[in-house]
Image: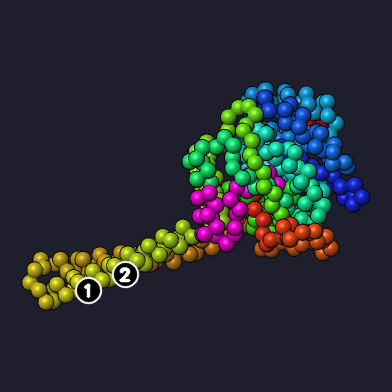
């Protein structure tokens, strides 16, 4: 949804996807509202209920009745965190949109610094966690390994520790929403669309209540979406393995021919059978590699991402210190109904 443009009084939207976070809603709002008031100007809060089965819908309805700038978007079922974020971005009305989790691991007080960087001219302000407060060593190692692998196999760099806590201008949000793919890795998409980005480090807090919805299975599924959405490297790796096997088979074929011509240790028919199998196996692997290259290109086409993103031609205020200088690219998880 396009924001109502008012350059003199821009609207700030805060999108909060929630799934079974009933005990976290009031504490989150108690910390979020003072931060928004301290910023001045107009603001709205959009909760995206991702098919909660606890008391979250009832509590959200009560909170929306008490807060005129709070809206609730309820999804028909649990579509996942990434989809809920997309839904929130599509329905947010702001000139800038902040996405934040509802478990209070993303400190709402950091919003003031995100907005400050936005006002300094950055179009994406990415919060980067230093160290999760209640995450196991295995999850931390897996997260770091995923980001390094993704940076290696794709042409984009995702900052380790970059969460779905970020500010995006309306221009960036519209470019992000122009990517219609269903198997999404939002952190990678935010990096892919580019724009001037600043990073703000923060210390992740323990969950206020409940337990994490990101199981190891969900993390593996997200890792698969990240790798397969941004790289055809697995296809090329399979093709490279086929070439290596074909070369090894060619070397062994030379040995078979040598044994058949210059020794008497072969069984009749052994040389011809092995030679046929090795040649056919090598040809099949090479053909599969070629097919893989075509499948990889089809895979890139069917995602229907925009071929390019055009920045609006408007002057950008230069950052005031070298630490805030923009870097190329930027680092991104979804969908809920409205209860206005």
Residue farthest to the bottom? 262
As drawn, 132 above or below 160: above
Q: Residue at x 37, y 62 (%)?
A: 241
User: What kind of element bears circle 1?
Assistant: helix
- Residue holding disc 2: 247
Q: Which residues are magenta?
A: 144-166
Query: Magenta segment: does it hold 151?
Result: yes
Please give the label number shown on residue 278.
none
- Left or right of residue 80, residue 268 in this image: left
Q: Quadrant of the C terminus?
A: top right
Query: Magenta segment: does it hold 75?
Result: no
Marks 2 and 1 sit apart, C-alpha to C-alpha, by 11 Å
Q: Residue at x 67, y 22 (%)?
A: 55
- Residue holding disc 1: 254
Residue farthest to the right? 8
Q: Residue at x 81, y 55 (%)?
A: 120
Q: How many marks?
A: 2
Crowd class of label 1 (few under 14; some 14 to 19; many from 20; radius 10 Å): few
In the rendering, at what x and y percent does residue 97 appear?
76, 46
In the rendering, at what x and y percent does residue 70 appear?
80, 33
């Amino acid at each position: 949804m396009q924001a109502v443009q008012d350059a003199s009084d821009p609207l700030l939207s805060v999108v909060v996807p929630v799934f079974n976070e009933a005990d976290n809603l009031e504490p989150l709002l108690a910390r979020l509202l003072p931060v928004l008031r301290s910023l001045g100007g107009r603001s709205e809060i959009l909760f995206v209920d991702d098919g909660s089965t606890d008391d979250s819908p009832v509590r959200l309805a009560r909170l929306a009745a008490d807060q005129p700038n709070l809206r609730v978007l309820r999804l028909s079922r649990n579509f996942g965190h990434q989809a809920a974020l997309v839904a929130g971005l599509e329905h947010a009305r702001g000139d800038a949109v902040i996405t934040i989790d509802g478990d209070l691991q993303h400190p709402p007080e950091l919003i003031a610094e995100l907005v400050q960087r936005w006002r300094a001219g950055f179009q994406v302000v990415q919060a980067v966690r230093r160290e999760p407060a209640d995450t196991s060593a295995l999850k931390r190692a897996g997260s770091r390994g995923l980001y390094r692998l993704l940076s290696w196999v794709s042409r984009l760099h995702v900052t380790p520790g970059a969460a779905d806590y970020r500010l995006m201008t309306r221009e960036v949000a519209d470019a992000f929403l122009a990517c219609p793919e269903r198997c999404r890795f939002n952190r990678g998409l935010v990096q892919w669309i580019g724009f001037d980005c600043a990073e703000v480090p923060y210390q992740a807090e323990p969950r206020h209540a409940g337990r994490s919805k990101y199981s190891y299975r969900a993390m593996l599924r997200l890792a698969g979406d990240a790798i397969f959405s941004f790289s055809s490297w697995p296809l090329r790796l399979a093709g490279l393995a086929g070439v290596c096997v074909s070369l090894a088979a060619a070397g062994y074929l030379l040995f078979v021919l040598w044994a058949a011509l210059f020794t008497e240790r072969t069984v009749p028919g052994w040389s011809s059978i092995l030679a046929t199998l090795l040649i056919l196996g090598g040809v099949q692997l090479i053909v599969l590699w070629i097919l893989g290259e075509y499948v990889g290109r089809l895979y890139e086409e069917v995602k229907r991402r925009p071929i390019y993103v055009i920045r609006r031609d408007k002057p950008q205020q230069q950052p005031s210190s070298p630490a805030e200088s923009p870097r190329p690219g930027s680092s991104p998880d979804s969908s809920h109904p409205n209860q206005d």
